[in-house]
């Protein structure tokens, strides 16, 4: 059995910056430091933050005066931000600059008179944050079926943007479907460069592997997209949370196993999974 490590793994720049900022706050203010929702969608990272004195909250109301509250890398809506800033808290914003760019673009397009079509996952924190920055008419389209079902109103002007971690192939398909019924659709689909590069690297890995292990959590949007991309290349994708999930049964039948990770999985986790596959491969010799 051959084992290959993807050329891009581990934290993206936005996740790394949010974690560094949180570590700084813990150092400066001491525990507890409060985070509004999960800082990133990865169980091992969240558990590590909790062990270091971070606390995850769903509502800033009731936090002690002067407490430090961090907005996660996914960003928040205008209403959530205003509500938190009205409280006597030390607000620290860890929104990824690339997410912020999409929030700003959505708001600008709306203010310029466009109906904004956002491609993204319903209920995802980043999507909620972007929608909550757009003042005018907006619609969330989650997949090509939604794009097919969408009925534009004549005389309206439309522009599309996307969640930063969408599958770039799916976005291209959705935009093409919409362009057929909305001539002149302004297309600002906004998958971030880190996601795009990682998706390209996984696509390439999946062409030479028959099984790709994707390190990450099931509720991480970018991780799920990587699994979709592996499958679209005809390979098997398995989401693994850690080295303990790597068993001979999981690898059975695979001749070439690839290992990759979502943007919120630490390199130590990826390395542990890679080594676990290697050990099984060695035992098979
Ligand atoms: S995936 Fe992209 S947008 Fe999201 S946190 Fe990472 S760099 Fe930022």
Image (spheres, rainbow, N blue to C red):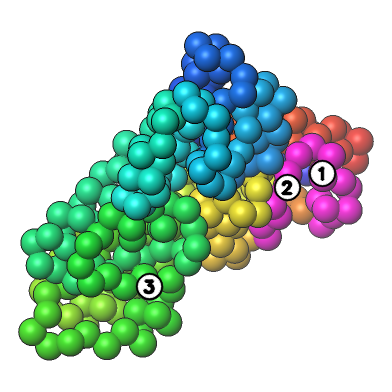
CB under 8 Å between discs 2 and 3: no
- Magenta residue span: 236-253
Residue pointed to by mark 1: 246
Lateral position of residue 260 relative to residue 61, left or right: right
Q: CA distance from mark 2 to mark 3?
A: 29 Å
Q: Residues within 10 Å of mark 1 (few under 14, many from 20)?
A: many
**Where 182 sits versus 243, above or below?**
below
Place residue 130 in its image quadrant.
bottom left
Give whichever of discs 3 and 1 has the lower sequence position: 3
Q: Quickly name the residue at label 3.
A: 141
Nearer to me, 212 or 182: 182
Q: Is residue 161 left or right of residue 2?
A: left
Q: CA distance from mark 3 to mark 1?
A: 36 Å
Tell me the number on the disc at residue 240: 2
Work out which residue is located at the far top of the displayed protein and give it.
28
Say which residue appears at 47% left-offset and 39% top-offset.
Answer: 72
Q: Secondary structure at mark 1?
A: loop
- The one of 65 and 11 positioned closer to us in this rendering: 65
Indicate which label's residue lies in the foreground, 1 or 2.
2
Which quarter of the rendered picture does the C terminus lie within? top right
Residue 1 at x, y = what percent?
78, 43
Left or right: 270, with 174 as reference point: right
- Find numbered disc 2 in the image and state the secondary structure of the residue it sits on: strand
Give coordinates of residue 162: x percent, y percent: 33, 59
Q: Can you see residue 250?
A: yes
Residues at circles 1 and 2 in contact by the CB criterion of under 8 Å = yes
Q: Residue at x 33, y 60 (%)?
A: 131
Residue 25 painted magenta: no
Residue in view at x 38 percent, y 73 percent: 141
Indicate the position of residue 252 as horizontal and vertical percent values.
84, 54
Depicted 104 relative to depicted 267: above or below: below
């Amino acid at each position: 059995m051959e084992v290959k490590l993807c050329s891009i793994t581990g934290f993206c720049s936005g996740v790394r910056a949010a974690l560094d900022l949180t570590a700084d706050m813990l150092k400066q203010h001491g525990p507890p430091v409060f985070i509004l929702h999960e800082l990133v969608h990865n169980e091992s990272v969240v558990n590590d933050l909790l062990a270091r004195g971070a606390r995850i909250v769903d509502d800033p109301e009731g936090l002690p005066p002067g407490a430090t509250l961090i907005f996660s890398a996914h960003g928040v809506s205008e209403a959530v931000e205003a509500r938190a800033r009205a409280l006597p808290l030390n607000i620290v914003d860890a929104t990824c600059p690339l997410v912020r760019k999409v929030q700003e673009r959505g708001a600008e397009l709306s203010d310029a008179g466009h109906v904004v079509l956002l491609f993204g996952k319903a209920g995802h924190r980043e999507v909620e944050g972007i929608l909550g920055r757009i003042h005018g008419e907006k619609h969330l389209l989650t997949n090509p079926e939604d794009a097919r079902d969408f009925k534009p109103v004549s005389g309206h002007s439309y522009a599309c943007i996307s969640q930063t971690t969408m599958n770039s192939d799916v976005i291209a398909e959705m935009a093409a479907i919409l362009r057929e019924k909305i001539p002149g659709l302004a297309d600002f689909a906004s998958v971030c460069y880190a996601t795009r590069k990682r998706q390209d690297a996984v696509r390439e890995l999946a062409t030479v592997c028959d099984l790709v292990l994707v390190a990450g959590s099931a509720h991480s949007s970018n991780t799920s997209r990587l699994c979709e991309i592996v499958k679209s290349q005809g390979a098997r994708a398995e989401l693994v949370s850690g080295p303990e999930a790597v068993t001979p049964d999981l690898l059975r039948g695979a001749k070439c196993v690839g290992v990759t990770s979502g943007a919120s999985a630490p390199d130590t986790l990826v390395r542990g999974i890679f080594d676990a596959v290697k050990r099984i491969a060695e035992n098979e010799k």
